[in-house]
Image (cartoon, rainbow, N blue to C red):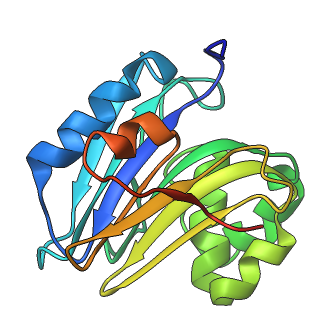
């Protein structure tokens, strides 16, 4: 299998915050995102989001995790949202954007429309959002950007690649289309 270096990598856990395990998973994805590394530990300890970034859109300001203005939501993502420019004007009327990143558009589209926002995205993507005590993960309907997951010891693990999760879990599945 050849390694495509034109992508980011995401990894995380929900229902606990085992930072060492997420660091191990992100280490397996480092080649995917050599430009930056970000992590979000949910304040109540219910999860961690990790991101290895390849800077393409908004190289100066688009490092991830990206927070909502009130810091109540955080997102990590991999991919590209082709229709983020047409979505932006409506969302800018309601929300203050801090980046020019297509990932921030996903965050505010979610804030505006909740889970139905995913249907409005045109692109290749995998992302995870933490909204206070709620976690969602999604990928594009064709599966161009994969998102694998596993459940172990009551925790939900996810990553862009199998090898990241298999460093922690034995059984791994791909998020269904």
User: Where does the image place residue 66, in percent across and percent down from the top left?
Assistant: 42, 53
Image quarter of the C terminus: bottom right
- For the residue pair 21 and 173, the one nearer the viewer reads as 173
Residue 97 visible in the picture: no
- For the residue pair 81 and 31, the one nearer the viewer reads as 31
- For the residue pair 161 and 11, the one nearer the viewer reads as 161
User: Where does the image place residue 97, in percent across and percent down from the top left?
Assistant: 55, 58
Quarter residue 107 falls in: bottom right
* Residue sitting at x 35%, y 27%: 28
* Residue sitting at x 51%, y 39%: 161
Residue 34 visible in the picture: yes
* Residue sitting at x 35%, y 43%: 166
Quarter residue 156 falls in: bottom left
Q: How many marks?
A: 0
User: Where does the image place residue 46, in percent across and percent down from the top left?
Assistant: 19, 77
In the figure, 55 relative to 65: above or below? above
Q: Single out the residue that lies furthest toward the front.
A: 170
In the figure, 117 relative to 133: above or below? above
* Residue sitting at x 55%, y 60%: 173
Image quarter of the N terminus: top right
Quarter residue 5 falls in: top right
């Amino acid at each position: 299998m050849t390694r495509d270096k034109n992508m980011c990598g995401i990894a995380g856990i929900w229902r606990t915050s085992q930072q060492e395990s997420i660091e191990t998973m992100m280490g397996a994805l480092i080649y995917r995102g050599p430009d930056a590394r970000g992590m979000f530990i949910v304040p109540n300890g219910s999860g961690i989001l990790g991101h290895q970034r390849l800077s393409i859109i908004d190289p100066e300001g688009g490092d991830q995790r990206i927070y909502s203005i009130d810091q109540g939501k955080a997102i990590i993502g991999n991919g590209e949202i082709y229709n983020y420019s047409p979505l932006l004007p409506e969302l800018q009327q309601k929300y203050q954007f801090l980046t020019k990143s297509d990932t921030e558009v996903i965050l505010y589209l979610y804030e505006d429309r909740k889970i139905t926002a995913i249907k409005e995205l045109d692109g290749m993507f995998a992302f995870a959002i933490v909204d206070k005590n709620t976690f969602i993960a999604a990928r594009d309907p064709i599966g161009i950007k994969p998102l694998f997951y596993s459940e172990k010891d009551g925790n939900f693990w996810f990553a862009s690649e199998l090898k990241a999760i298999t460093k922690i879990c034995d059984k791994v599945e791909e998020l269904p289309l």
